[in-house]
Image (spheres, rainbow, N blue to C red):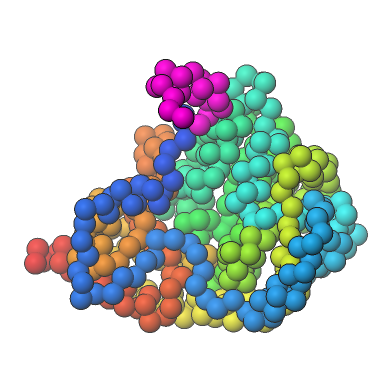
Amino acid sequence: MAYTSGFTEKIFKKMNPGLASLQPYPFEKLARLKQGLSPPANKSAIDLSIGEPKHKTPDFILDEIKAHLPSTAAYPKTRGQEKLREAITRWLCKRFRLTENSIHPDKHILPVNGTREALFAFAQCIVDHRKSRPVVISPNPFYQIYEGAALLAGAHPVFVNCTAENNFIPDFSSVTADTWNDCQLIYICTPGNPTGAVLDHVTLAKLMDLADKYDFIIASDECYSEIYLDEDHPPIGLLQAAAEAGRDDYRRCIVFHSLSKRSNVPGLRSGFVAGDQELIESFFKYRTYHGCVMPGFTQAASIAAWQDEIHVIQNRKLYREKFAAVLEILAPVMNVYRPEAGFYLWPEVPISDQTFTQQLFSKQNITVLPGSFLSRTANGINPGNNRLRIALVASPEECVEAAVRIRDQIHTLSTGN
């Protein structure tokens, strides 16, 4: 049935007004940027634009999925299996030095279908759009789900720049008292996507003090927490910082964790939310109506994954090797650094990031993501301009080959040939 444009306009006027403010997703912009360009046929395509792990999924996780497929015959519970919550609790205690007395599987843990849907849904649950000009703060550059979640929750997104001058840590001192007063929720990402920067104890403690003073909630996206480059110095988490500050009720603090990067199972869609008991209970109530539940076979595989660290250590080793090999090639020709964590490089390029991305594709058959697609202009600057996000998720051989071609393209720019 065909509808007139006038009828369509009337329908849209009755929909969530935040939909009109949503920007295209970065990969939609990338597809348009590449449109009409033809890469060289004699060079194999290497895609380093998407943060999708390509390392092998451990066999024991796949075995658990297969063994528990019959569990689809029963409805799973929103709160998840007790065994899963217990496995998550034990992992949190060991990884972030929490005590079993301070975190309980029935009070502080809620399994979710990956961090993406939970990060989005949390804002819909928490933000009170009936209050005048509610604000949601996020880092800049950022994971675009934060912005979309804010807009569709009826909030105004405010971006805090992460620049080299501040070691890519959000400059919270740039936020005005009026903005803090209006803030209901702040997203942080530590380790950062795409910068790899880790928020330290002092920064997290100051943020918790601000949350107490201005009455907002801290949502910490920690899905890259297990991809770090120094085996002796794992990144601190928000709950760890809270416990060390003496607030073991994790007041105003919520963390989001995922198996996607840690265990190379992005298609499993498995993660969890943990923290403040009252917030967890409210989010549980919301999700009961939202209808997001984790299938039984996913829960079984997740229990096995959270209980094993050997495959995670091996995973980090492979990323370290790729960083070392790629940086040896790229560091002499561009401003690029080894991040503290995550699997991204965030280098500067000598020309527009979008133009360089086009040239890299059309001349070298390499796909990366322009940094400006991951950020917004705030306080007069776009911190993604003239930067690239390069995801070292491909095989070591492909990552090295990509680095050689990127170096060649930079040499082409400098020589004009």
Left or right position of 59 against 307: left
| Residue 401 x/y as whole percent | 31, 78
Q: Is residue 370 magenta?
A: no
Q: Residue furthest left?
A: 417
| Residue 239 x/y as whole percent | 74, 55
Q: Main secondary structure of the magenta part?
A: helix
Left or right position of 267 against 416: right
Q: Which residues are magenta?
A: 1-19
Q: Is residue 271 above or below residue 16?
A: below
Q: Quadrant of residue 131?
A: top right
Q: Which residue does the image show at 62% across and 40% down from the upper left? A: 186
Q: Residue furthest front?
A: 1
Quarter of the picture holding the C terminus: bottom left
Q: Is residue 161 above or below residue 59?
A: above
Q: Which residue does the image show at 67% across and 21% down from the upper left? A: 130
User: Is 330 or 210 nearer to us in this picture?
Assistant: 330
Q: Is residue 8 magenta?
A: yes
Q: Which residue does the image show at 46% across and 19% down from the upper left? A: 7
